[in-house]
Image: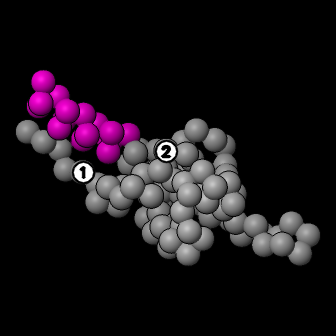
Amino acid sequence: MFKELNPLLHSELRLAIMSLLLSVEEADFVFIREQTKATAGNLSVQLNKLNEAGYINVTKSFKGNMPCTTCKITEKGVNAFEEYVDALKSYINKMD
């Protein structure tokens, strides 16, 4: 039987953000935007969705006079990502 895919993570950009944050301790908005090639507006919306779900923590601060947004994956986010990967595997294994 197939496992249900998490609709929040079943988005190319949100999945890319989560994958990226799994590989680093934390990342700032500019780095995530450059790595995902997303527009600033779209990235902001997707980060808010992940933050509201508790999958990431978003910290806003200033470096000098410049605003800085830093993101870090949460334990809940790691668990959700792992469950998503397991669900994908259930589809792949059914094809073998």
> Which of the labelled discs sits on residue 39, or is there none?
none
Q: Which mark is residue 5?
A: 1
> Which quadrant is home to the N terminus?
top left
Q: Is residue 67 left or right of residue 95?
A: right
* Amino acid identity at mark 1: Leu
Residue, far left:
1
Residue 82 drawn at (x, y percent):
38, 40
In magenta, the rendered stretch is 82-96
**Other-residue count near label 1 (Cα within 10 Å), few / some / many at <14 / 14–19 / ≥20:** some
Question: Is the residue marked by circle 2 packed among few (<14), some (14-19), or many (20+) residues within 10 Å?
Answer: some
Q: Residue at x 55, y 45 (%)?
A: 20
Say which of 58 and 92 sits in front. Answer: 92
Give how far apart the Cα atoms at labels 2 and 1 are.
Answer: 16 Å
Q: What residue is drawn where x is 89% and y is 75%?
A: 65
The main secondary structure of the magenta stretch is helix
- Above/below status of 51 relative to 77: below
